[in-house]
Image (cartoon, rainbow, N blue to C red):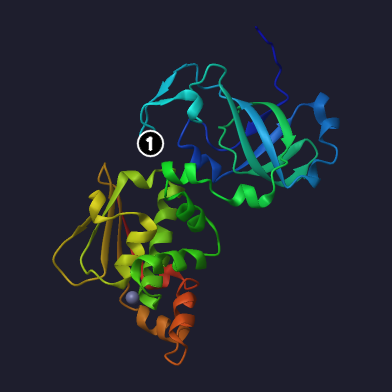
């Protein structure tokens, strides 16, 4: 059966080319609704989450089997890939703000100018949305960690890193802080951490924290140890671009002032997460 449908509005954001959905979701998008449908937005601000139905306008390919960097040999209907018969995307987003015919949303993975076909109030409970299904974890076990990185509260990240490290200490917290900043720098460039690897010198508590948060592990050949005893981390992508991060020469005074010796170890560890990364580490860009 042939069906004709009209868009009801469009997506406005700064992403003009298709990139990894997780990266688009980081941006706030605006959904601009066409004049004749504005009445339909009445009471929408009472919806905390809404489902957006949109059209993948930059993709005219149709594939029944999807093969990509992260998806291997799966039927299209078992994925969220855009190369589907009707090129329709459905994503649950958080409604941040409503301004006349403009909805500000977070979590949308549609690029700029995508036609919007429909909007629905999401009837799934908040708990269900925040929960990561095991089937999703099986595909992307680090999704939970990536969510914690993007959150302003990084305590959960430290508890999880402690599971790997065996205890929670200021050292691993320093690694968690550094790792979260590294991941943020990669996400800010709209790049995929998957394409990066790290070289480090000293195997210590900090390195365990960094390794846990970034996923740069020796088993995946994403972590190389080189001789030396400096806290220097070289993080580069396949093109040799990235950063060198060093413990800064003058950070002692700042750290001692923020984390006095008499403060209990556990309290000091969590306090590390709130420290100013740029006063502890020097970052040199490799371009
Ligand atoms: Zn430790």
Q: Name the residue nearer the viewer: 108 or 186.
A: 108
User: Which SS class for mark 1?
Assistant: loop
| View extreme (bottom): residue | 262
Position of 34 compared to 244: left or right? Answer: right
Number of marks in the rendered image = 1
Q: Name the residue nearer the viewer: 149 or 257.
A: 149
Q: Mark 1 sits on what residue?
A: 70
Query: 264 above or below 72?
Result: below
Residue 148, position as x, y percentages in the image? 50, 58
Residue 229, position as x, y percentages in the image? 19, 72
Residue 158, position as x, y percentages in the image? 45, 68
Position of 166 compared to 137: left or right? Answer: left
Query: 67 above or below 244?
Result: above
Q: Would you say residue 81 is visible in this rendering?
A: no
Q: Quadrant of residue 89?
A: top right
Look at 55% across and 64% down and name the residue there: 153
Residue 42, position as x, y percentages in the image? 85, 37
Query: 191 above or below 173?
Result: above
Look at 64% across and 32% down and name the residue there: 11
| View extreme (top): residue | 1
Q: Name the residue nearer the viewer: 137 or 279.
A: 137
Q: Would you say residue 240 is visible in this rendering?
A: yes
Look at 20% across and 66% down and name the residue there: 201
Q: Residues within 10 Å of mark 1 (few under 14, many from 20)?
A: few
| View extreme (left): residue | 227
Look at 24% across and 52% down and name the residue there: 219
Q: Name the residue nearer the viewer: 197 or 67.
A: 67
- The image quadrant where one finds ligand 1 is bottom left
Quadrant of the snapshot with the N terminus: top right
Q: Quadrant of residue 40?
A: top right
Mark 1 vs ligand 1: CB below 8 Å: no
């Amino acid at each position: 059966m042939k069906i004709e449908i009209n868009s009801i509005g469009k997506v406005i954001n700064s992403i003009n080319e298709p990139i990894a959905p997780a990266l688009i979701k980081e941006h706030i998008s605006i959904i601009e609704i066409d004049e004749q449908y504005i009445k339909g937005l009445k009471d929408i601000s009472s919806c905390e989450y809404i489902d957006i139905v949109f059209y993948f306008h930059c993709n005219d390919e149709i594939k029944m089997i999807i093969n990509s960097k992260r998806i291997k040999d799966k039927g299209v209907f078992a994925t969220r890939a855009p190369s589907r018969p009707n090129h329709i995307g459905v994503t649950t987003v958080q409604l941040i703000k409503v301004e006349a015919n403009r909805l500000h949303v977070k979590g949308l993975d549609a690029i700029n100018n995508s036609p919007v076909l429909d909007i629905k109030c999401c009837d799934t409970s908040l708990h269900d949305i925040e929960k990561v299904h095991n089937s999703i974890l099986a595909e992307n076990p680090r999704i939970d960690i990536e969510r914690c990185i993007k959150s302003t509260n990084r305590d959960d990240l430290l508890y999880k890193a402690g599971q790997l490290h065996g205890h929670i200490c200021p050292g691993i917290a320093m690694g968690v802080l550094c790792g979260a900043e590294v991941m943020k720098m990669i996400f800010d460039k709209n790049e995929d951490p998957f394409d990066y690897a790290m070289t480090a010198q000293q195997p210590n508590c900090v390195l365990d924290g960094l390794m846990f948060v970034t996923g740069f592990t020796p088993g995946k050949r994403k972590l190389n140890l080189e001789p030396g005893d400096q806290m220097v981390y070289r993080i580069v992508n396949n093109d040799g671009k990235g950063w060198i991060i060093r413990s800064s020469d003058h950070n002692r005074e700042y750290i001692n002032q923020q984390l006095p010796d008499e403060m209990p170890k556990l309290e000091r560890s969590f306090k590390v997460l709130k420290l100013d990364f740029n006063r502890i580490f020097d970052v040199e860009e490799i371009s």
